[in-house]
Amino acid sequence: MRRAGSVVAQILLEISDLVKPGATTADLDLFAQTRTKELGAKPAFKGYHGFPATLCVSVNEEVVHGIPSKKRILKDGDIVGIDFGVVLDGWFGDSARTFPVGKVSHEAEKLLEITEKSLYLGIEQARPGNHLFDIGYAVQNFVESHGYSVVREFVGHGIGKSLHEDPQVPNFGIRGKGMLLKPGMVLAIEPMINAGKPEVRVLSDGWTAVTVDKALSAHFEHTVAITEQGPEILTRV
Ligand code: MG
Ligand code: MG
C-alpha cells in the first residue's frame, strides 16, 4: 500500500503543475491516465460502478465525482478538486487535493486552507486506542468553528485490497464513539467541506455532486495507515 500510495502522491504532485487557466479537465485526466500506466499501476476509479475516467475533477460548487470533460475549461479564480486512486499489485491508494486556479478570492483561499487543516486534524486522531468517530469529531469541530459545513452524504472509508472497504469514516461524529482503532487498519480520510450549507445533490449525469446552495466546496484526502507509532500517511511523496 505504500507503493500504491506513493504513485498516487507523485502523480497528484505532477498534476498540480498543469492546473492553470485554459487547461481542460480532460487534459488533466489524460495526463493522469498516461502517468498511471507509466508507473506500472492501474486507475482505481475508471470503470468503478461505471465511472468513465481516471480522475474525479470537481470545480467550484461541485463537491465530488465530477467527470472530466474537454468542454470544461479551467479559468482564473476557480478551485478544482482532484480525486485520484490507483491499484498496484492488488493494493489500492486514494487521495484528493483541491487546487486554486490562478488567483482565487480570499474566501476560496480560506476554504482550501481550513479544509486541508481539518484533514490533518482528522489524521492526527487515527491512532491505536482512539475511536473511529474521534476522526470525524476533530474535522467537524474545526470546520464548523470557522462557519463551514460538513457534507453528510459522502464519507471516507477503509481501503486495502478494494477501493472502498468497511468501515465508513464520516467527517462528523461524537468523540469516543465508533470502533476502536487498531494497528494495521488503513483508512481513506477525506473531508468534503462546504462554504455554505451542508446539502448536496447529484446532477443528471448521475455522478457530479454539487452544493444545493451553489456555494464553494473543497475536498482533501489521504490514505492513512494506523501504526503502533500513530498515523502514517501513505499518499505522500
Ligand atoms: Mg478519493
Ligand atoms: Mg476515497
Image (cartoon, helix red, strand yellow):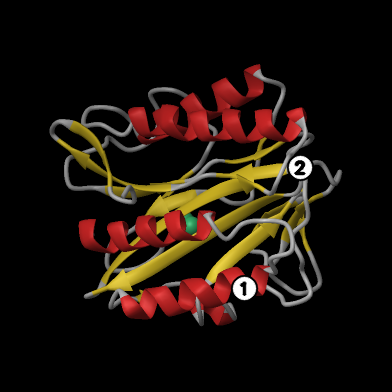
Circle 1 SS class: helix
Residue at position x 27%, y 35% in the image? 180
Task: Name which residue type carries label 2.
Answer: Leu
Task: Return the residue nearer the eye: 127 or 63.
Answer: 63
Q: Nearer the viewer, mark 1 or mark 2?
A: 1
Distance from the alpha carbon under mark 1 to that under mark 2 = 23 Å
* Circle 2 residue: 216
Mark earlier in primary sequence (1, 2): 1
Task: Name which residue type carries label 1.
Answer: Asp
Decide if residue 210 is in sight here. Answer: yes
Image quarter for residue 124? Answer: top left
Circle 1 Cα neighbour tier, 10 Å, few/some/many (<14 / 14–19 / ≥20): some
Is 74 displayed left or right of 161 in the figure?
A: right
Q: Is residue 29 above or below residue 139?
A: below
Q: Is the residue at mark 1 in contact range of ligand 1, meaning its CB lies under 8 Å from it?
A: no
Task: Return the residue nearer the eye: 192 or 39.
Answer: 39
Q: Position of residue 26 (x, y in %)?
A: 65, 74
